[in-house]
Amino acid sequence: MDRPAGASYQRFPRVRIRDLKDDYAKFELRDTDASMANALRRVMIAEVPTVAIDLVEIEVNSSVLNDEFIAHRLGLIPLTSAAAMQMRFSRDCDACDGDGSCEYCSVEFHLAARATDSDQTLEVTSNDLRSMDPKVCPVDQARAYQQALGGTDPFGANTSNENRGILIVKLRRGQELRLRAIARKGIGKDHAKWSPAATVTFMYEPDIRINEELMETLTVEERRSLIESSPTKVFKLDSANQVVVDNAEAYTYDDEVIKHAEAMGKPGLVEINAKEDSFIFTVETTGAITAYELIMNAVTVLRQKLDAVRLQDDDGDLGELGAHLGGP
């Protein structure tokens, strides 16, 4: 599609998916600038909502861990959160009083475990949590359920540990843990337990150019030395002993190759520049939502924030601010 004359490339970003799994995605973001790339990254980490345990009522706890420690561990267990975007924040819900018995803003969990074997330590894990809403449960339970139906594990879990769950506490004979927990919708900006992202990174796509005329003046040993000067495998020798770019994205902007070329008396042998309008994203999730949902929900949240800014502009707030900053 042709762009309007004079339009900024920043307004027409393009995305190309390279790799997409349930818990991992790698994609290219082109024709935009660093502000948009960083905004998307920060929204994915801190503003895409998920569901996490937020309130814990301990009924019985005779374990070695205190109540606060157990409550903190429960909060960090990732819960399936595909429906989080449609849920209400508990602070905005007018259908309940925040006690957890509300289908619009919260999910109730129960846990009851008691060790009776004198010779065996009982491991209490996320698999012992019982959810009152089948759509929201610990990620490990969802994986085990999918495998029980004959499906494959989308997250590639180790088969030896696939059903163990996330450890909460260990109980010895006579010790008991019984509690009620309330999970609520939230965002990573409020607490890390609500962040759906294990890691989100992006890098500028490198533009690497080799001066072929200068390269011809090097011996094969000097070419090998140049290749080895890079901490990562960026270059290689082809069958004709020519230096070629093997993996441009492995470059870490360390300038070691450029410094080595200058030390050899060959400045300009290799030129490496960052493409300021092209970024490569790597996204890994906690399992609360899939990588695809994380990206699409982040775009939705970013649109909502931009719409809010646009409404403020329509009300004249930003116009007054611009006039103030611009001066007379």
Image (cartoon, rainbow, N blue to C red):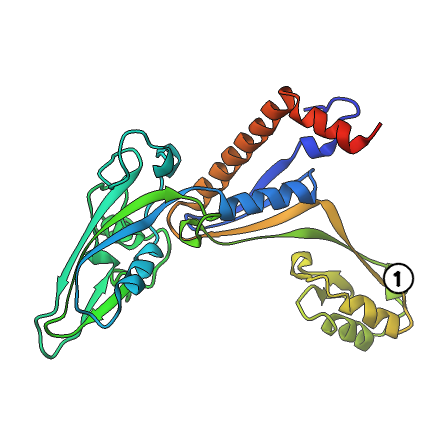
**Residue 83 visible, this angle:** no
**Residue 163 visible, this angle:** yes
Q: Secondary structure at mark 1?
A: loop
Q: Nearer the viewer, residue 238 or 18?
A: 18
Q: Quadrant of residue 220?
A: bottom right
Q: Residues within 10 Å of mark 1 (few under 14, many from 20)?
A: some
Image quadrant occupied by the N terminus = top right
Q: Residue furthest bottom?
A: 119
For disc 1, the marked residue is: 268
| 7 horizontally vs 163: left or right | right
Residue 166 drawn above or below residue 92? below
Residue 17 placement (x, y as % from top left): 55, 43
Residue 228 placement (x, y as % from top left): 72, 74
Q: Nearer the viewer, residue 55 or 267?
A: 55
Residue shown at the point (63%, 36%) measured from the top left: 14
| 134 horizontally vs 265: left or right | left
Residue shown at the point (50%, 35%) measured from the top left: 301
Q: Amino acid at mark 1?
A: Gly
Residue 61 placement (x, y as % from top left): 18, 64
Residue 132 placement (x, y as % from top left): 19, 43
Image quadrant occupied by the C terminus = top right
Residue shown at the point (14%, 62%) measured from the top left: 113
